[in-house]
Each structure stands twice: as C-alpha cells, then as structure tokens.
Image (spheres, helix red, strand yellow):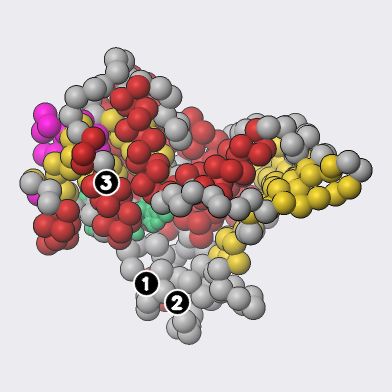
Amino acid sequence: MARHTGKLGVAIVGTGGIAQNTHMPGWQQLKGQKVEMVASCDVIEERAQEAAEKFDVPHVFTDYRKVLKMDEVDIVDVCTPNKFHKPITVAALRAGKHVIVEKPMAMTVAEARAMCRAAKKARRKLMVAQSMRFSAETMAMKEFVDSGALGRIYYAHASMLRRRGIPGWGVFTSKELQGGGPLIDLGVHILDLVLWLMDFPEPATVSGVTYQEIGTRKGIGGMGAWDHRNFTVEDHGAALIRFKNGACVMLEASFALNIAENNMNQVFVCGTKGGVSNSPLTFIREEHGNLTTAQPQYLPKIRSHHEEIRQFVDCIRKDTPSPVPGEQAIVTQKILSGIYESAEQRAEVKVR
Ligand SMILES: NC(=O)c1ccc[n+]([C@@H]2O[C@H](COP(=O)([O-])OP(=O)(O)OC[C@H]3O[C@@H](n4cnc5c(N)ncnc54)[C@H](O)[C@@H]3O)[C@@H](O)[C@H]2O)c1
C-alpha cells in the first residue's frame, strides 16, 4: 500500500458513549490535518443524529452497509457493542476501508482471526483501540522496559477492580452481546498492557475463575441502575497465565467485589534487575548496590484516546505497521477465551 497524503474521510459506527466522549473529539482535533468525519451511523437514528449535530458531521445513517458504499469514507471507526465488531470490521475492510475497532477486538478467537485475514487480504490497516497503551505514563513504562532495565521479565500483575461499578448503560451485562463481563471488558485493557510491556511472550496455559455473586442480586451502588434480572456475565474473574518462557501474569478484574475501595487499578511488571509499576508511575532498579525507586516527573499531558487516533492516522499516512495490530489482539483473545474455558472446567487449560 502506498502512503496516503490526501484527505481522509472518517465514518463512526456506533455513536454511543465511547464514540461521543472520546473518539469523535479525537477525530475533531485532526480536522486541520485533512482528516474529517463524514458519516455518523447508529442503529438508533436519534443518537446518530445527535452525534452528527454535536460534531458537525454531514451524513447520518442507521445501516453501516450504506456507509461502506460512500467513496468519501476511507476509515471506519467501530464503536458498537462487541458482538458487532467482527461483522462490521470485515465488511468495512472488504469495502477497502481502514478500520479502527474498539476493544475487545472480538468475542472469540475465530472472530479475531477472521478480522486479521480480512485486513491482510484487503491490504488495509486494522488497529484495535487499546487506549491504555497511549498515555504518557504507559509510554514511559514501555520505554523503561524496552531499555532492558528490568533484566529478564518473569512476573507481572494486572488488576482492575471495581467495588461497585456494574455499568448501568449499554449492554455490558449481556454475555450474548459482549462475550463476557469484567474480564473481557476491563481485563482486556490491562492484559494487553502487560503483554505489550513484556513484548508478547507466547502463552502456554491458564487457570481461571469467574464468579457471579453480586450482579444477579438487586444490589446497592453501581454506575447507574443495572438490570440484575438480565445479568448474564461474571461480576469478578481472576487468572494465572503461564508463558512458554517461564514468565507468568496474575490478572484480576471485577465489576463488583466486596473490597475496601472502588477502582483498585494496578499493573506492575517485574524482572531480575528491576521493575515498573503504573499507579503511581514508578521505576524500580538495582543501582550501585542499592535498590532504588524513581518517580518520573513533568510527563506531557496526553489524552490516550486522542493519541491512539493520531497514531492510527499516522500509520495510514506513512504506510507503517498498525500501532495495535490485530495479530496481538488474537493472543489476548486466546488467553481470555482460555480463562473462561478454564473457569468452566475448573481446571488449568492450554492456550490455543
Ligand atoms: N477504550 C475504552 O476505554 C472504552 C470505554 C468504554 C467502552 N469501550 C468499548 O466501546 C464499545 C461501545 O461501548 P459504549 O460504552 O460506547 O457503548 P454504548 O452502548 O454507549 O454505545 C454503543 C452504540 O452502538 C450502537 N449500535 C449497536 N449495534 C449497532 C450496529 N450494528 N450498527 C451501528 N450502531 C450500533 C448502539 O445503539 C449504541 O449507541 C464496546 O466495545 C466497549 O468495549 C471502550
């Protein structure tokens, strides 16, 4: 594929929360750089219309297939519930569009593979919107890890725990539409982050547990009232992931758990010579015979969702690899699917 120096038209498909709060403002910021939103599409017409008015987008649709017929559309930004990521992405790629798709890339490994195949065949860019990779803190973590400061990495921990944070909007409590609960919704963020920091070692086995203890009861708290009668996902999940190189990751994610605080979010990666932790950002290393910790100061203010969009446009313009290639998301999806399988079987399973 050649470099793309001309105008790039963008279509947003699924103009709900994430689209209106982060993606559309992100695209808007690139208006001066020959990047323009040309279509707003949602199955709920008023929502597509509302987004179009808010962000000055000329065309409104309720059917994404009509969007794909527009010659002015070069990029499709898929912000629908997870179930629709694969069909919309594959159709868009087949229509010759570049695609950025929200996380998780898909609900199953087979879906993720089909999306990658479609991108390869169409020779178009496919990026998964793993926004956590694009903050100043995580980019600093990556630089520190890539410098070799950690030595051989053998252990990482990734947790995103909400005390009471069951989403009351969207379809986050529906297994059919999302593929799972906090593991696939929140766990995918931090799992991707540690795998990226560790340079994607090859997974071997996982041992996972999932629980559904709070979401199905008429409970207290939450991020809006959720429908406990139709709560079909786990409310807490955890796993031990073993890699072929001997390293392991401990992962835990919850929508609701009886812990002391809300939002206990932490990622750390440890090696033979040092470590790195995100909350607060801390670099750990052995120096001059001492164990030292350093907290980087004056990091630039970067809005991660805007940065991911900027980097996606950059890869199209320069014809460089996707900043978050689908092939990496296949690995993440294999691990998540393995965790659900292991939880069901109550046994450690191979990652396939
Ligand atoms: N990166 C992040 O931090 C982050 C945060 C929240 C959500 N997300 C992801 O974004 C996606 C959407 O989440 P949300 O919170 O915006 O949900 P939402 O329910 O607010 O918005 C989804 C929108 O998609 C529309 N839709 C459903 N099917 C469609 C179809 N076939 N064609 C067009 N529109 C369709 C819905 O009507 C709705 O307006 C999910 O995959 C979620 O995992 C990512």
Q: Nearer the viewer, residue 280 or 257?
A: 280
Left or right of 77? Residue 208 is right
The numbered mark at residue 222 is 2
Please identify the quadrant where the C terminus is shown.
top right
Q: Is mark 3 within 8 Å of ligand 1?
A: no
The numbered mark at residue 29 is 3
* Mark 1 nearby-residue class (10 Å; few <14, some 14–19, many ≥20): some
Left or right of 31? Residue 290 is right
Asked if the residues shown at circle 2 and circle 1 are in contact, with their CB atoms under 8 angstroms apart, the answer is yes
Q: Mark 3 or mark 2, which is nearer the start of the sequence? A: 3
The numbered mark at residue 176 is none
Instruction: Kindly identify the amino acid type of the residue bearing the numbered disc 1.
Output: Gly
Q: Residue at x 12, y 51 (%)?
A: 56
Ligand 1 visible in quadrant: bottom left
> Helix, strand or loop at disc 2?
loop
Task: Give the CA distance from mark 1 to mark 3.
Answer: 30 Å
Q: Please state the horizontal and vertical placement of residue 212, each as a whole percent of the image.
A: 55, 69
Q: Is residue 37 visible?
A: yes
Q: Residue at x 24, y 22 (%)?
A: 5
Residue stretch in magenta: 60-76
Q: Which residue matches tag 1?
A: 168
Residue 116 sits in quarter:
top left
Q: Mark 3 or mark 1, which is nearer the start of the sequence? A: 3
Instruction: Kindly identify the amino acid type of the residue bearing the numbered disc 2.
Output: Gly
> Helix, strand or loop at disc 1?
loop
Instruction: Kindly identify the amino acid type of the residue bearing the numbered disc 3.
Output: Gln
User: As drawn, which residue projects farthest toward the top?
Assistant: 2
Task: Give the CA distance from mark 2 to mark 1.
Answer: 7 Å
